[in-house]
Image: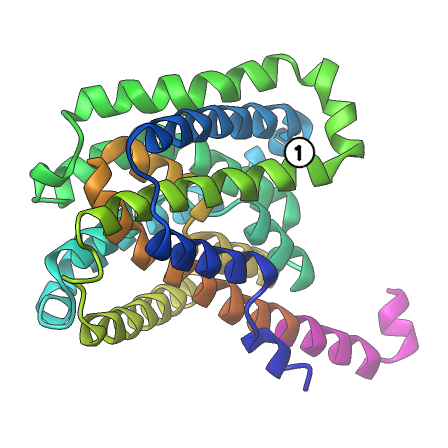
Amino acid sequence: MRRLTYLIPDNFTLSLVGTVIFASLLPCRGETAVAVNWLTNIAIGLLFFLHGGKLSREAVVAGATHWRLHVVVLLSTFVMFPLLGLALKPLVAPLVTPALYTGILFLCTLPSTVQSSIAFTSIARGNVPAAVCSASASSLIGIFLTPALVSVVVTNHAATSGSGWHTVGAIVMQLLVPFVAGQLLRPVIGPWLDRNRRVLKFVDQGSILLVVYTAFSEAVNEGLWHHLPLAALAGLFFVNAVLLAIALGITTVTSKRLGFNREDQITIIFCGSKKSLASGIPMAKVIFASQAVGAVVLPLMLFHQMQLMVCAALAQKWSMRDARAERSQPAGAQQH
């Protein structure tokens, strides 16, 4: 029964599904859409401001010296994934629509997650300080690298909202500037955020739900569901499963072949195989034209839930295996 609980979507995933349904039934239009869009931009800026205030510089410095591990994670995130997205095109193209394939390529260019990568690394008894550093560095580098990668791997430039430099500038102003401001004000707001983590969670999830609602409202107004057959959704599920399995396999084999210890292997697997929903949806809003965002973020939303379920099961399995190994050791060996 405990294993079956990993197959049950969490409350946030259910909220995402509910938001998509609500936007499909009652999409915002006209002046309401303009107002909701402004509210969404403010929420995104606040989100990255609070993330900047929350991120501990000490924790990042503690893991920053492990450069070999960080290089492997960054190469997995920003090189392996885009190459996989391009290499899988012969398999993917017949199964999904062109818009969904654009979303898969966009998914492949995104940075790693922060919170869940660290949480799963901790559960599986991996190198937590290194996970904090790798995931945080991936998130920051992604602000600049993701739009550049999108301009290279996504050939449907008509779906983007502007030139590469314009996109980078928009992301810097909307995401990086608030983040840096939060870092600078961390001595002031950091202790309060540490005591009130629910505030950050509320803004985090609330801003994503707002972006999803506005994105799907625009997409529905443009006829998204009329141009998206059920067969394409089934194909998207299969493609995401294949992509996640390959990423987990490559990071597992690579980390072993490079001689990393078990704790570092766990960190590489969890940080190098995951993609950030929290960063991806706001970026999609900036990078892509409004009518294209709904279809573009569908692969990311599905991949997000799949990676959470699979990595949660792996983390629990590895944690229990280590616990059994410790119990089977002689008392003297455990003390040693």
Image quarter (top left, top right, bottom left or bottom right) of the C terminus? bottom right
Residue shown at 53% from the left, 57% from the top = 15
In the image, is residue 316 above or below residue 33? below
- 241 up-or-down from 214: above or below: below
Residue at x 12% of width, y 63% of height = 89
- Under mark 1, the amino acid is Ala
Residue 105 seen anywhere in this rendered image of the structure = yes
Which sits in the foreground, 158 or 151?
A: 158
**How did the renderer colour the structure?**
rainbow
Quarter occupied by residue 327: bottom right
> Magenta span covers which residues?
317-336
The tally of labels here is 1
Residue shown at the point (68%, 81%) measured from the top left: 2
User: Overall secondary structure of the magenta stretch?
Assistant: helix
Q: Position of residue 294 (x, y in %)?
A: 28, 49
**In the depicted view, which residue is nearer to us: 52 or 7?**
7
Q: Which residue is identified by label 1?
A: 59
Label 1: state its secondary structure. helix
Q: Residues within 10 Å of mark 1 (few under 14, many from 20)?
A: some
The image position of residue 50, as x and y in percent, is 60, 27
Q: Position of residue 53 (x, y in %)?
A: 63, 23
